[in-house]
Image: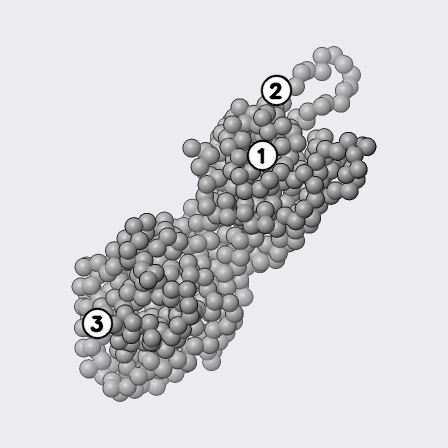
Amino acid sequence: MTDLLHQDTGVHIDLDGGSLTIADAVRFARHGGRATLSTAATRRVEAARALKGDLIAREIPIYGVTTGFGDSAHRQIAPEKAAQLQQNMLRFLGAGTGPVASPEVTRLTMLFRANCLAKGNSGVRRELIEQLLTLLNHDILPLIPERGSCGASGDLVPLSYVGRALVGETEVAYEGATREASDVLAELGLEPLELEAKEGLALTNGTSFMSGFAVLAAADARELAFTVDLCTAMASQALLGNHGHFNAFLFEAKPHPGIIESATNIRSLLGGSELTHDAEEIVPLDGAGFRELTRSVQDKYSIRCAPHITGALRDTLEWVDRWIEIEINSSDDNPLFDVGAGRVQSGGNFYGSHMAQGMDALKIALANLCDLMDRQLELVVDEKFNAGLTPNLIPYFAPDDFEAGLHHGFKGMQLSCSALTAEAMKLCNPASIHSRSTEAHNQDKVSMGTISARDARSIVEIAQHIAAIHLIALAQALDLRGIEQASPKVREAHALIRARVAPLDRDRRMDRDIAAVVELIRSGELSHVLG
């Protein structure tokens, strides 16, 4: 049985509604683990549920508990109908479309929903959270369609699939097969939940689905920032560039933290190179009236300004990560039960504005990285700019060799890279400004946070493929230039690439090579060359 409870490599998370980190969430999503409800959280959950019961018994109208949803909030129902209302909510929201979310996103969606409820403001039973965690810990994952959320009232449609897994009314992925949730629950000796008042709303009314995409996009973007620093160091050497562009003095004069970090990385990666130079090393004119320099005092912007572009991504991630950690440790549903005041309060915590605007900003920073790599690749493959390397990085052939003139090397790789870059740029259009009035004009201003987060995920995946193409080309360029002259750390990165992709000795398909290096990027191994 695929039981993540017994995986030694996983992380154990004790959910308290306030201390979940991005790092632990990513480890849980990608390596498994075990999540439990903390003792303190249990007490808060039970207190809020008791308050909910008292208010219902007093026949006070409570939004979504003893009233209808959305524009039906003016229709109050009797307390004995409250449970059925929640079950019906999960059913009418089952309208998702599109591809099924990845297991990683689904695990995070379930984890974040449980953590929200653990905060103890939602009025649900402890047993509901524990059943959700049982499914999660056994890697029983509802099949959640990606499309259908406007980001307010949260991720209603996607999260309804999580709720229906608990009540046994949807399909789940379990042990490599698609199964009915009711059958899997029976195998585990569990009864499908019969929801109490507010519980359907508490499960669906929040930002957990968009946050799942956001967490993974932000984590992968941080790895991409290093990957682009590595590409810049490799490109600088392949093009016989000027390593003085990355001297500390320049960045201390414009001390954005992200720029400083990127420049520091590139300096470290260039250390010991025999291929680069500093403008100071160019001999003086020595009285002559004119000469053509064999080494330039300044490289093109895509090399010289690379720390400024990658640094902007790093600095964007600093505040995006803060926003994400606040979001995944929040009560993001509605209404909330204020135990201290003995009342229920309605608001808009389900609104995904911070995820929407954070992901829109991340998308732009990532698309700029894609464009940067595409421009660097052009310099490396184009014989007009590549400082004497072969056209399209083809192998060297003697003029009388039959193979001469038959090969086009990285021409197709550059075409693919350009197409990918265009797609990334198209996707970086901000989704947060495209609000739609929906739900009978009750949800008249919505966040579009889920669409933005999904777009960020897509741009990350595109950027990983662009980086893979660029790294393969740079490895080829350094082979042609003489890899033994490259810096030690770049030689180490080159060896990691060469362990997966052979040098290009004649035209061949390269899609499998791209896939292999994408997996190298995703593994995080490349960043280990910094030590």
Q: Which residue in the protein does label 2 denote?
A: 280
**Residue at x 67%, y 16% (from the top left corner):** 283
Q: Marks 1/3: CA distance?
A: 59 Å
- Residue at (25% x, 59% y) in the render: 36
Residue shown at 22%/75% (left/top)? 52
Instruction: Single out the residue that lies furthest toward the right.
Output: 400
Mark 3, other Cα within 10 Å: few <14 / some 14–19 / many ≥20: many
- Above or below residue 165? Residue 287 is above
The amino acid type found where label 3 is placed reads Arg
**Residue at image mark 3:** 49
Rendered view: 51 above or below 456: below
Q: Secondary structure at mark 2?
A: helix
Q: How many marks?
A: 3
**Cβ atoms under marks 2 and 3 closer than 8 Å:** no
Looking at this view, is 484 or 177 the one in front?
Answer: 177
Closer to the chain start, of discs 2 and 3, is 3
Work out whether mark 1 precedes mark 2 in sequence or the reverse, and give the earlier one. Answer: 1
Query: The C terminus lies in which quarter of the figure?
Result: top left
Q: Describe residue 475's horizontal placement relative to residue 291 as left or right.
A: left
Q: Is residue 468 left or right of residue 439?
A: right
Q: Which quarter of the figure is the N terminus placed in? A: bottom left
Label disc, if present, on residue 136 of the rendered structure: none
Give how far across and how far down residue 180 sits, in percent: 38, 75
In the depicted structure, whether residue 86 falls above or below residue 530: below
Please say if 134 is above or below 182. above
Q: Secondary structure at mark 3?
A: helix
Give the structural element (helix, strand or loop) at label 1.
helix
Query: From where the camera sits, is residue 414 visible?
Result: no
Q: Which residue is mark 1?
A: 234
